């Protein structure tokens, strides 16, 4: 399970299962990547639930 993140400057992909980890990124600062990961960690239950509903899993 993963999520794609788009910023005004670039993109990132984070795996959210089995653990939250950065998979790939383009033109996103390390500071912004840390902020994004913190937001994913904070909202992992909502993200996972919406992901599963969207993909009928």
Image: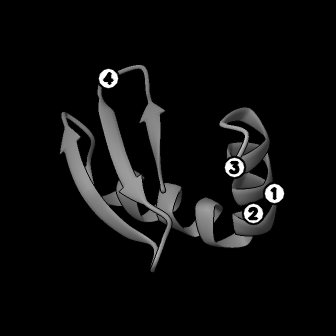
Label 1 and label 2: CA atoms lie apart by 6 Å
- Of 4 and 28, nearer the camera is 4
* In this view, the mark in front (1 or 3): 3
Residue 56 location, x and y as percent? 73, 39
The 10 Å Cα crowd at callout 1, few under 14, some 14 to 19, many 20 or more, is: few
At numbered mark 2, what does the secondary structure look like: helix, strand or loop?
loop
Q: Quadrant of residue 25?
A: top left
Verify CB contact (< 8 Å) between mark 4 and mark 1. no
Verify CB contact (< 8 Å) between mark 1 and mark 2. yes
Upstream in sequence: badge 4 or badge 2: 4
Residue at x 25% of width, y 57% of height: 23
Residue that badge 1 annotates: 46
Label 1 and label 3: CA atoms lie apart by 15 Å
Residue that badge 2 annotates: 43
* In this view, the mark in front (1 or 2): 1
At numbered mark 3, what does the secondary structure look like: helix, strand or loop?
loop
Q: Quadrant of residue 7?
A: top left
The 10 Å Cα crowd at callout 2, few under 14, some 14 to 19, many 20 or more, is: few
Upstream in sequence: badge 4 or badge 3: 4
Residue that badge 4 annotates: 9
Residue 9 location, x and y as percent? 32, 23
Residue that badge 3 annotates: 57
Residue 46 location, x and y as percent? 81, 57
Verify CB contact (< 8 Å) between mark 4 and mark 3. no
Residue at x 71% of width, y 53% of height: 47
């Amino acid at each position: 399970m993963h999520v794609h993140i788009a910023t005004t400057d670039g993109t990132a992909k984070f795996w959210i299962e089995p653990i939250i980890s950065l998979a790939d990124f383009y033109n996103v600062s390390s500071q912004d990547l840390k902020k994004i990961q913190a937001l994913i960690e904070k909202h992992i239950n909502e993200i996972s639930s919406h992901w599963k509903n969207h993909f009928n899993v």
